């Protein structure tokens, strides 16, 4: 899209919004000079912007509005109350024209006629709109609606119009989209979509093409702005003026709808997400409270549970909203990938066609930030070990140019990232043989291993060794780095490979990641949590297998001697020496180190807050996690602790 | 066609028109416990919104349409589980 137009779409809508906000103030207070000035400025600026584009009818309508406001500025009584609804209608029309510019680049046919009609109305001095009194004999639907939407009405100011739109049951057949119509209602502050006959039909009886609904709502807009929207369905709609119960009109209280863009520091969003996570955890505490109350007072427990349900839903809404704000398209994070593929391929003397699709899919910022590294590793691996040299490919009847594709797609709450090559594939027999040679498994276990499981061995720590480290995919870290990076993102990798045909790696990652998976452990009388991504494995061994070695203690795990440290002692306590011993294996500088703990408790998903205050200076503390019962767990940073 | 079914997930993609109501209903008929994924949806025709309101499948994601996110999603949330 033309950059100028793009800018106009944003600014134009903001100006419309500003103008409408001022007009709403003027409806209640026609003499408000500040609002008249502000509306005049907004409309004047808008007229200038509109002039740049092929929008002559809009320019005429805005010019008339500007003239009217100009004379109102000079009049001691301000604006004539009858003029405001027509100004609102004019701005609404300009807003629709801005939409049309976005959709088709033009105002569409009929714009001249619409402009002429608006100008005719503006030329008249007497109010046209039917006057609606907020009378005491409200229709039943309006009373019910006012009760239902009391909360929304309490905060509203100015003129309010309630509407009830009951589309015919064959509305869909006629091509109507009733909610699309509602979406154009200005200043909508409450909306309900109700079944037409008391209850919604069930799965067995529902007719997908029958409309059968009633749409009720309240708009902080004059009737004159609403009537044109429903002009094609006048027999299906009813209006009723409502009294705003809220505070007096404040100057420049802008309606909440409309597109205003903010640039926000990512750190603030993180803080907001943190807060929401803690809110969710705090809300969890109610579940426990309700449980306890049940024994004392079942009726009270019921009330608590109902309140908990409401709270949970509200937290859910906020959580989704915050998650949505944190979503970013993957594109920018992967922008360097095509260039890197070309460079690596040239280095390796290979010919590769790389395709990338689905990079417009949005994921949590954390995932977008964390995905590049493991993906680059997989790409290097595919170019190095997957795709064969051009002459090898030609000899086996393949095109000399290899194909590498990266496809990203959404599946429910997950994002799937599939990297597929049409290279040599991975031979499970060879992988098993290598794993045995490298001491990862013994020959008997290898023989029993299914092919699919054998492929996973390439992610085992220690599988990639110097023998296969080449310039490109080596660098001292094996595919286990990919595995741990994906684990950190709480994802999963699957491999499919056919010898001679190619390999595909499928990463399944959560699209929204705001919590960390923790293992809760007991040490002495204390509880701690350890991030799962720092745990290589857990083991339970007889205490007699812990043998003194030099100045310390060691244990043989998987045919490898691993130093054993007491977590209790590291934390300044005393080792309880339980038998069998529970060991938590982590890695310090790439080497496994086992930590002796008393118990492994349970797993939790929780927000980990960066340590603050006194804890901030302790590198072995990764942060704190809030529990459902309100308790706080210290989250240990194992590599720092054993370093 | 804006309805894509994959296992237990029904994805609504892009602008869903009135004719997408039937495949959505069919997918829920097959398995009413399926989740409806709106992450890739832009806008939903009233007919689809009605099915979601009436049948209350589990919903994930928010369509691009700000009207949906602001006004319709809360209705789907409020209704969920209250019957």
Image (cartoon, rainbow, N blue to C red):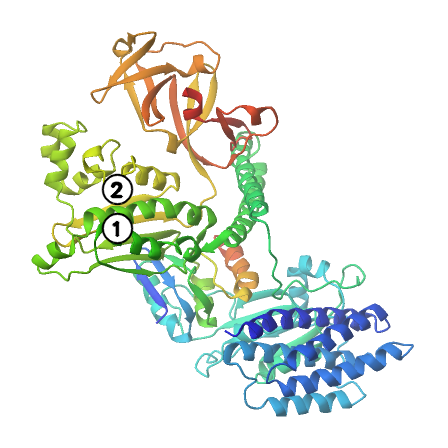
Q: Is residue A461 above or below residue A76?
A: above
Lateral position of residue A139 relative to residue A322, left or right? right
Give the label on residue A624, or none. Answer: none
Residue drawn where x is 57% and y is 63% of the image: B71
- Kindly tell me whether residue A134 is visible in this rendering: no
**CB-based contact (under 8 Å), mark 1 and mark 2:** yes
Lateral position of residue A276 relative to residue A71, left or right? left
Mark 1 belongs to which subunit? A
Who comes first in sequence, dot 1 or dot 2? 1
Residue A3 x, y percent position in the rendering: 54, 72
Q: Quadrant of residue A576?
A: top left
User: How far apart are the two marked residues, 1 and 2, measured between alpha carbons?
Assistant: 9 Å
Residue drawn where x is 38% and y is 32% of the image: A532
Q: Is residue A354 above or below residue A635?
A: below
Q: Quadrant of residue A224?
A: bottom right
Mark 2 belongs to which subunit? A
Residue A278 x, y percent position in the rendering: 55, 38
The residue at which mark 2 appears reads as A471
The residue at which mark 1 appears reads as A347
Outermost residue on the right side: it is A76
- Kindly tell me whether residue A451 is visible in this rendering: yes
Residue A624 x, y percent position in the rendering: 52, 30
Residue drawn where x is 40% and y is 56% of the image: A335
């Amino acid at each position: 899209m033309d950059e100028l137009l793009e800018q106009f779409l944003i600014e134009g809508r903001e100006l419309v919004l500003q103008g409408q906000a001022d007009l709403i103030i003027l409806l209640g207070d026609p003499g408000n000079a500040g609002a008249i000035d502000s509306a005049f400025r907004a409309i004047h600026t808008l007229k200038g912007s509109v002039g740049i584009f092929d929008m002559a009818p809009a320019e005429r309508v805005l010019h008339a509005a500007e003239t009217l406001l100009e004379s109102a500025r000079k009049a001691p009584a301000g604006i004539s109350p009858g003029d405001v609804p027509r100004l609102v209608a004019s701005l609404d029309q300009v807003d629709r024209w801005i939409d049309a510019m976005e959709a088709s680049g033009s105002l569409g046919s009929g714009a001249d006629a619409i402009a002429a009609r608006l100008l005719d109305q503006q030329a008249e001095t007497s109010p046209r709109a039917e006057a609606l009194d907020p009378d005491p004999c409200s229709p039943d639907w309006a009373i019910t609606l006012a009760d239902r939407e009391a909360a929304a009405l309490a905060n509203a100011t100015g003129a309010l119009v309630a509407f009830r739109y009951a589309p015919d049951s064959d509305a869909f057949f006629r091509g109507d989209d009733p909610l699309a119509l509602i979406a154009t209602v200005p200043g909508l502050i409450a909306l309900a979509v109700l079944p037409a006959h008391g209850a919604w039909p069930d799965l067995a009886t529902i007719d997908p093409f029958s409309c059968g609904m009633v749409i009720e709502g309240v708009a902080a807009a004059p009737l004159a702005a609403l009537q044109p929207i429903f002009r094609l369905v006048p027999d299906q709609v009813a209006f009723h003026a409502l009294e705003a119960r809220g505070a007096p009109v404040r100057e420049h209280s802008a309606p909440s709808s409309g597109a205003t863009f903010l640039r926000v520091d990512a750190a603030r969003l993180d803080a907001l997400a943190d807060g929401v996570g803690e809110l969710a955890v705090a809300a969890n505490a109610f579940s426990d409270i309700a449980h306890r109350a049940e024994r004392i007072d079942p009726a009270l427990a019921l009330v608590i549970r109902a309140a908990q349900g409401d709270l949970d839903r509200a937290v859910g809404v906020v959580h989704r909203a915050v998650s949505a704000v944190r979503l970013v398209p993957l594109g920018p994070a992967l922008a360097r990938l095509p260039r890197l593929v070309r460079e690596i391929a040239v280095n390796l003397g290979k010919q590769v066609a790389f395709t990338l699709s689905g990079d417009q899919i949005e994921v949590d910022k954390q995932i977008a930030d964390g995905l590049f590294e493991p993906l680059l590793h997989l790409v290097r691996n595919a170019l190095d070990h997957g795709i064969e040299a051009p002459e090898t490919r030609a000899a086996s009847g393949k095109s000399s140019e290899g194909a590498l594709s990266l496809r990203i797609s959404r599946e429910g709450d997950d994002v799937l990232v599939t990297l597929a090559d049409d290279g040599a594939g991975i031979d499970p027999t060879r992988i098993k043989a290598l794993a045995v040679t490298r001491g990862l498994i013994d020959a008997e276990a290898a023989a029993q291993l299914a092919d699919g499981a054998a492929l996973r061995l390439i992610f085992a720590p220690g599988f990639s060794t110097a023998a296969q480290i080449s310039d490109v995919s080596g660098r001292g870290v094996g595919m286990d780095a990919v595995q741990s990076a994906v684990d950190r993102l709480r994802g999963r990798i699957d491999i499919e490979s056919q010898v001679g045909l190619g390999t595909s790696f499928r990463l399944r990652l959560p699209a929204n990641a705001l919590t960390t998976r923790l293992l809760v452990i007991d040490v002495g009388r204390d509880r701690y949590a350890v991030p799962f991504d720092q745990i290589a494995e857990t083991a339970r061994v007889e205490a007699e297998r812990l043998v003194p070695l030099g100045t310390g203690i060691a244990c043989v795990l998987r045919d490898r001697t691993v130093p054993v440290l007491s977590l209790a002692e590291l934390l300044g306590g005393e080792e309880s020496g339980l038998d069998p011993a529970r060991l938590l294996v982590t890695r310090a500088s790439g080497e496994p180190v086992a930590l002796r703990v008393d118990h492994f408790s349970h797993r939790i998903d929780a927000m980990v807050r960066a340590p603050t205050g006194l804890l901030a200076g302790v590198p072995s503390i990764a942060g704190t996690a809030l529990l459902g019962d309100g308790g706080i767990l210290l989250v240990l940073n194992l590599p720092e602790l054993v370093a | 066609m804006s309805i894509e079914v994959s296992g237990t997930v029904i994805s609504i993609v892009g602008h869903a028109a009135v004719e997408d109501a039937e495949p959505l209903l069919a997918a829920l008929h097959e398995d009413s416990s399926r989740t409806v994924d709106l992450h890739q949806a832009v806008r939903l025709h009233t007919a689809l919104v009605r099915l979601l309101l009436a049948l209350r499948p589990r919903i994930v994601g928010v369509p691009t349409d700000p009207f949906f996110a602001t006004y319709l999603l809360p209705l789907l949330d409020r209704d969920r589980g209250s019957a």
